[in-house]
Image: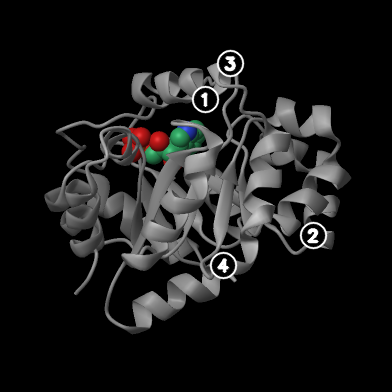
Amino acid sequence: MIQKAIEQVLANGDRAFVPYIMAGDGGLETLKATILRLQKIGVTAIEIGIPFTDPVADGPTIELAGQRALKNGTTLKSTLATLASFAEEVTIPLVAMTYLNPILACGAEKFAHDAKQAGIHGVIIPDMPLEERAIIYQALQQEQIALIQLISLTSPAERIKKLAAASEGFIYAVTVNGITGARSDFADELEKHFAKLKAASPIPVLAGFGISTPEHVKKFASFSDGVIVGSKIVDALANDDWETVEALVVASKQ
Ligand SMILES: O=P(O)(O)OC[C@@H](O)[C@@H](O)c1c[nH]c2ccccc12
């Protein structure tokens, strides 16, 4: 469903726009209104972060949002239960971003089952190497949940080939070396890097990390299939600043 949703957007001449939000930031009771409003303004899918105590890939903005969410008691379980309570109203695919630990604590099968009920169509597990995916792969397959792979800027060609062949839904192409967070500059070689990824990949290639302005969105739209925006969206939502959110989404349209 994720791949189809992205391909539909591309067929329109637009690029995919996937906002990242932290579940429970502002309280889980706000999750429904946030998701439905993002859906209404035309995002392609939503990446939902599950707060975790040791988020090694998260930059300061996402880490702080996670701390706020943990403080008010948000867990993997309460997030999935909340999502399930309004899943019928959600027509776009949701992607869960969670570290391996909470999944293992829950149990792979139970996680996959509850995620499906919650409307989750894909997962990103940044601390699970491809070689370890057997831990969860079958359970996800059973529920038809895509396991999305991250590809870094420094991945050698052989590795890119492997990851591209294994990824499902889309490829999460990381645009910087380092952690998440808004930035102003990107490497000059990005365009070439994306050309390589697109040549290696049978599925859409989305860019994420550091994308924080409509100009960034337009830049990446010119050589990728779409963008993922995290920190800037998390900040805007914390300030109830929907104007900023909408301007980013609009930039992904033709
Ligand atoms: O915040 P940024 O720089 O816009 O990047 C997206 C990112 O936050 C989101 O996709 C994400 C949050 N935590 C992660 C951990 C690993 C990979 C990706 C993520």
- Amino acid type assigned to the residue bearing label 2 in the image: Gln
Residue 175's quadrant in the figure?
A: top left
Indicate which label's residue lies in the foreground, 4 or 2.
Answer: 4
Give the SS element for disc 3: loop
Indicate which label's residue lies in the foreground, 3 or 4.
Answer: 4
- What residue sits 63% from the left and 61% below the top? 87
Decide which of 25, 214 is in the foreground and name it: 25
- What residue sits 62% from the left and 38% below the top? 125
Give the SS element for disc 4: helix
Give the SS element for disc 2: helix
Q: Is residue 245 visible?
A: yes
Residue 126 vertical position relative to residue 90 in the rendered view, above or below: above
- Sequence-first tag of 1 and 3: 3
Give the SS element for disc 1: helix
Spatial CA distance of label 4 from label 2 is: 24 Å
Q: Which residue is mark 1?
A: 69
- Sequence-first tag of 3 and 4: 3
Q: Which residue is mark 2?
A: 141
Q: Which residue is mark 4?
A: 89
Please tell me how crowded label 3 is: few (under 14), some (14-19), or many (20+) other residues with Cα within 10 Å: few
Residue 104 vertical position relative to residue 16 in the rendered view, above or below: above
Tag 2–tag 3 contact (CB < 8 Å)? no
Tag 1–tag 2 contact (CB < 8 Å)? no
Q: Is residue 166 visible?
A: no
Q: Give the quarter of the figure containing the C terminus.
A: bottom left
Tag 4–tag 2 contact (CB < 8 Å)? no
- Sequence-first tag of 1 and 2: 1
Q: Locate residue 183, reporting x and y percent.
A: 21, 31
Q: Which residue is mark 3?
A: 54
- Sequence-first tag of 2 and 3: 3
